[in-house]
């Protein structure tokens, strides 16, 4: 059962050294990253928190963020499929994509409302992504059922619908990176807002799992332990401030 973040014990928070964070709907307000998020990130970074961006967006967009956001270093794109480290070759974290097969499955299951490839398809190689185009959760869940019958995985976010032959799992990717950063799973917090973040919320995987306020509207197999009071970037700042406070209290 998901509890309000305000009830999380500071001692449990101060053990966290790394935050794996979704971007869209989690760090954003009206689709943009506000200055308040960058400020909260700066404060937490100074106190020793390392943030790994973990997005469903394309490798191209994730690489840009990893390079230019003030405290970003590495980013995981395409729901755990690719790791982006500026000035290093892209790393594929899953098997290569069977593009033609996925296109065919998309054609068959969409029926008379064809799925539209995302505009960022040119910068995406881990999965095949389509615009959600206003489809409701129930409509997308029906597409997921049809995809499953063809042995294809379908997950969705607030903006996109993703098809892949591998099981998309942001959490599995985070565990791989954490090993390279020498961070233990119980020292990791995760935060997200949507269905494609369920791998970040899988029980027993991470020390602290958080959803922004929007998660109360979702039907989830794996729900986060904690939820922020506010949605999007404001909720993200809540978490960062709580962590920074808990860390500061421990240092005193
Ligand atoms: Mg999101």
Image (cartoon, rainbow, N blue to C red):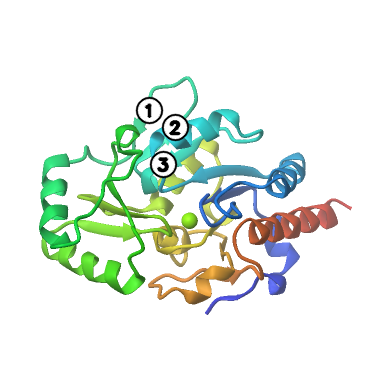
Instruction: Report the disc number at residue 77.
Output: 3
Instruction: Tell me if 136 is positioned left or right of 206 in this view.
Output: left
- Can you give x and y, in whole percent of width and height, for residue 173 in the image? 41, 46
Return the residue at label 1. 90
- Can you give x and y, in whole percent of width and height, for residue 233 in the image? 63, 55
Return the residue at label 2. 84
Which comes sooner in the sequence, label 3 or label 2?
3
- Rate crowding at label 2 as few (under 14), some (14 to 19) or many (20 or more) other CA atoms within 10 Å: many
Residue at left 48%, top 28%? Answer: 85
Residue at left 59%, top 47%? Answer: 32
Towards the viewer: 143 or 171: 143
- Rate crowding at label 1 as few (under 14), some (14 to 19) or many (20 or more) other CA atoms within 10 Å: few
Instruction: Tell me if 112 is positioned left or right of 30 in this view.
Output: left
Which comes sooner in the sequence, label 2 or label 1?
2
Q: Is residue 189 visible?
A: no
Dot 1: element: loop
The part of the image, by quadrant, that contains residue 121 is top left
- Ligand 1 within 8 Å of the CB at mark 1: no
Contact (Cβ within 8 Å) of mark 2 with mark 1: yes
Contact (Cβ within 8 Å) of mark 3 with mark 1: no
- Can you give x and y, in whole percent of width and height, for residue 226 in the image? 59, 70
Q: CA distance from mark 2 to mark 1?
A: 6 Å
Contact (Cβ within 8 Å) of mark 3 with mark 2: yes
Residue at left 35%, top 38%? Answer: 120
Dot 3: element: strand
Residue 130 in the image: above or below residue 218: above
Residue at left 32%, top 45%? Answer: 118
Which comes sooner in the sequence, label 3 or label 1?
3
Q: CA distance from mark 3 to mark 2?
A: 7 Å
Q: Is residue 67 visible?
A: yes
The single residue placed furthest to the bottom in the displayed view is 1
- Can you give x and y, in whole percent of width and height, for residue 157 in the image? 40, 58
């Amino acid at each position: 059962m998901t509890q309000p973040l305000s009830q999380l014990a500071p001692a449990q928070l101060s053990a966290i050294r790394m935050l794996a964070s979704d971007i869209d709907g989690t760090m954003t307000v009206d689709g943009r990253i506000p200055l308040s998020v960058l400020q909260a990130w700066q404060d937490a970074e100074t106190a020793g928190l390392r943030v790994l961006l973990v997005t469903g967006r394309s490798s191209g967009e994730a690489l840009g963020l990893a390079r230019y956001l003030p405290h970003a270093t590495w980013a995981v794109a395409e729901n755990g499929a690719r790791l982006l480290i500026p000035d290093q070759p892209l790393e594929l974290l899953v098997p290569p994509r069977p593009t033609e097969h996925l296109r065919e499955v998309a054609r068959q299951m969409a029926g008379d409302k064809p799925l539209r490839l995302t505009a960022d398809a040119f910068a995406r190689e881990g999965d095949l992504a389509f615009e959600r185009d206003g489809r409701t959760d129930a409509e997308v869940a029906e597409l997921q059922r049809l995809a499953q019958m063809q042995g294809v995985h379908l997950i969705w976010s607030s903006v996109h619908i993703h098809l892949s032959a591998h099981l998309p799992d942001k959490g599995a990717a985070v565990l791989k990176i954490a090993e390279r950063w020498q961070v233990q799973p119980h020292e990791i917090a995760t935060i997200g807002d949507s269905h494609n973040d369920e791998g970040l919320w899988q029980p027993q995987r991470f020390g602290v799992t958080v959803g922004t306020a929007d998660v109360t509207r979702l039907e989830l197999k794996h729900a986060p332990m904690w939820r922020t009071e506010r949605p999007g970037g404001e909720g993200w700042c809540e978490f960062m401030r709580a962590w920074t406070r808990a860390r500061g209290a421990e240092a005193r």
